[in-house]
Image (spheres, rainbow, N blue to C red):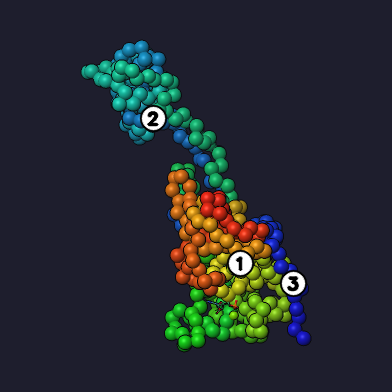
Amino acid sequence: MSPTTSENVLSYLEAAACVRQHAEKARHTARAVEQAPLLAAAGRVLAQPIVSDRSQPPFPRATRDGFACRAAELMAGQLRVAGQLRAGEPWTMGPLAAGDAVEIMTGAAVPRGADCVVMIEDVQTSGVFVGLTAQRTLAPGDNIVDAGAEAHEGAVLAAEGRRMTVPMIGAAASCGYATLAVFARPRVAILATGDELVDVSREPLPHQIRNSNSYSLAAQTLAAGGAPRILPVVPDEVTATEDALAKALEMDLIVLAGGVSMGKYDVVEQALLRCGAEFFFTGARIQPGKPVVFGRLAERYFFGLPGNPVSTMVTFALFVAPLLRALGGEIDSGPRFVTARMEEEVRVKTGLTRFLPARMESDVGGAGVRPVAWQGSGDLAAAAKANGFVVVPETADRLPAGAMVSVLIL
Ligand code: AMP
Ligand code: MG
């Protein structure tokens, strides 16, 4: 007799909460740290905070080309131009004397005594004198950012556990980080199962198909901060699957695709059980992706994803990516949803949370989304046209045109 799992099929929200709980635990486990050159740290998860090493700006910064002066004095009449100050040049002539102005360039340090910078567009000069153009006004603080107004020395500009964005790269550079400590990428074993699969480099026979899941999963793994290891395709046999699992245990996370449905040769769950796996859930009321399983095997998390290519990528985005990001130390690890306006009505049956491939277009006024026609969870051609998946809640039988809906981003 082969062992059996007790069925534990959850709603989408329950399954997501289960993964979130384990992600929270995973985030708090120790992990290796690497030192990355600044540019190589783009997209990596910070293992240290980015701390401002000086005040930002470090000096009162002129934000316009013009004249540094006292606002009240220039409002009252002409001032004498006492000198010129370029960005990167220190002012050595002491505090600004009464009745004086200094010609100043954007990015230069405003001399002591000046309380504003008047824009070049707002003044007229005659000889060594400068005066405000009629109708223009000026107030203290205009066109100056005070020293420390953006950040004080010692301020945390980005916390440990955040993934490095473009502004964070800029902020790190401005604080003098030539290298950054980042968390090592979790290693992810990718195991496609199925007797019908041949590698992309081989010519399939008429009854065979190419293994696409290993590649889409590896791409998703990279995007979620993991290091994918594509292992050889596993035939639909229990012992072969057990052997493959033993090898996969060398990695930090195991992702299987295929072989988790009800078919006679869907042996993944059986093999997992025989290896001693614990299952947190054995299905979710979602479409695509219903047979998805999640559990733990010898101190490693594993996911068994359904093999239909669109199911594989949707369940990865919903469940695997959040856990993987947490294993990589990322604070904000949940699935990525955005809100968009439905451009046309869709009707579905209730009872499953659905993720419909859709094309979203966004502009400054918001995003509009339109489902793409598809033949179901094997339809990679439809998924390739889409750039997101419209979420239809379990209880909804339609989403009317104009409704604001959630869109899952892969
Ligand atoms: P399964 O989940 O194993 O029942 O597979 C469901 C469907 O997905 C079948 O049509 C399989 O041929 C297909 N499939 C399974 N694994 C892959 C894969 N790695 N690449 C492409 N299609 C697959
Ligand atoms: Mg199969």
Q: Is residue 326 above or below residue 92?
A: below
Instruction: Give whichever of 375, 213 is nearer the camera.
Output: 375
Residue linked to disc 3: 7
Q: Which amino acid type is shown beneath numbered disc 3?
A: Glu
Ligand number 1: quarter of image: bottom right
Category of crowding for the residue at label 1, using alpha-carbon neighbours closer than 10 angstroms: few (below 14), some (14–19), many (at least 20) = many
Instruction: Give whichever of 63, 352 is nearer the camera.
Output: 352
**Of helix, strand and loop, which one carries label 3?**
loop
Mark number, residue 62: 2
**Of helix, strand and loop, which one carries label 1?**
strand
The CA span between labels 1 and 2 is: 57 Å
Q: Is residue 220 left or right of residue 301?
A: left
At 39% from the left and 30% from the top, the residue drawn is 62
Residue 129 visible in this rendered orientation of the protein: yes
Mark number, residue 23: none
Which x, y percent locates residue 210? Answer: 48, 80
> Which quadrant, please, contains the N terminus?
bottom right
Q: Nearer the viewer, mark 1 or mark 3?
A: 1
Q: Quadrant of residue 132?
A: top left
At 53% from the left and 73% from the top, the residue drawn is 378
Residue that protrudes farthest toward the left in the picture? 127
Q: Earlier in the sequence, mark 1 or mark 3?
A: 3
Residue linked to disc 1: 287
Q: Nearer the viewer, mark 2 or mark 3?
A: 3
Q: Which amino acid type is shown beneath numbered disc 1?
A: Gln
Which x, y percent locates residue 206? Answer: 47, 87
Say whether mark 1 is within 8 Å of ligand 1: no
The CA span between labels 2 and 3 is: 67 Å
At 43% from the left and 48% from the top, the residue drawn is 363
Q: Earlier in the sequence, mark 1 or mark 2?
A: 2
The CA span between labels 1 and 3 is: 18 Å
Which x, y percent locates residue 152? Answer: 53, 35
